[in-house]
Image (cartoon, grey):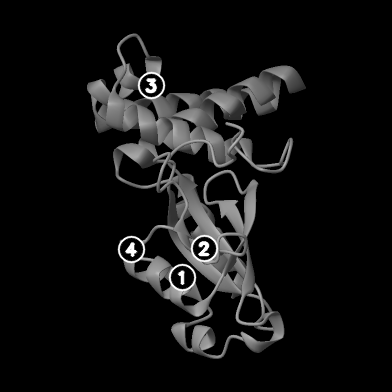
Amino acid sequence: MSIDVFPSREALAALDWAKGDGLLPVVVQDADTLAVLMLGYANAESLELTLVTGHMTFYSRSRQRLWTKGESSGNVLAVTAVRVDCDSDSLLVSARPAGPTCHTGAESCFAQAPGSFLGRLDALVRQRAQDRPAGSYTTSLFEAGTRRIAQKVGEEGVETALAGVVQDDAALLGESADLLFHLTVLLRARGLGLEDAVAVLAARHAT
């Protein structure tokens, strides 16, 4: 598994382990919804193991040992990115959870953690692409193939444009929602996600 490390692996080598007696706080964020999932602690060994395995491994202060999230429940955190804060003494980890993150069975250890609905939609579409559940409209789109999905995006684009000119706000919002959904499916049919399109926007903004 490939993990992006920002700003660089060299930055990890410069982490300030001394400030926390060999431990750094780690905030874990859902890579798709951006919801905060949990807070844990890492030492140098657990961080290195995380980068090698791709699964978030912490250091338990109470048990005084390394532990990989999901080692007993199976609800692992598949890490996609590690970011270092400005003081080099804490980490922000982006991950895709394999199940509930909290031991209570909740998705997050923080009640009602805010997140991105578009991220949740993208994750759901990705799951539909893999599982193809019977009776699902999304499944029917994937079964119809990329050409048909692209045709739907074109139809929804025209309907959105027309709504913007001759219909009310409710109609425009409804058509826009249809367009966003079908665009999400088209991207996933090509092995891409909304985050890839957002990354292009971010790169353009940076220049």
State yes or no: discs 4 and 2 in contact (Cβ < 8 Å): no
Q: Residues within 10 Å of mark 4 (few under 14, many from 20)?
A: some
Q: Please state the horizontal and vertical placement of residue 61, each as a whole percent of the image.
A: 61, 64
Q: Which residue appears at 74% of the width and 37% of the height?
A: 111
- Residue 53 is tagged as 4
Secondary structure at numbered mark 3: helix
State yes or no: discs 1 and 2 in contact (Cβ < 8 Å): yes
Q: Which residue appears at 49% of the width and 53% of the height?
A: 95
> Residue 31 or 207: which is nearer the viewer?
31
- Residue 46 is tagged as 1
Amino acid type of the residue tagged 3 in the rendering: Thr
Q: Please state the horizontal and vertical placement of residue 80, each as a whole percent of the image.
A: 44, 59
Q: Earlier in the sequence, mark 1 or mark 2?
A: 1
**Does residue 169 appear to the left or right of 67 in the view shown?**
right
State yes or no: discs 3 and 1 in contact (Cβ < 8 Å): no
Camera-nearest label, 3 or 1: 1
Q: Which residue is mark 2?
A: 58
Camera-nearest label, 3 or 4: 4
Q: Earlier in the sequence, mark 3 or mark 4?
A: 4
Secondary structure at numbered mark 2: strand
Q: Quadrant of residue 49?
A: bottom left
Question: Relative to residue 179, is residue 204 depicted above or below?
Answer: below
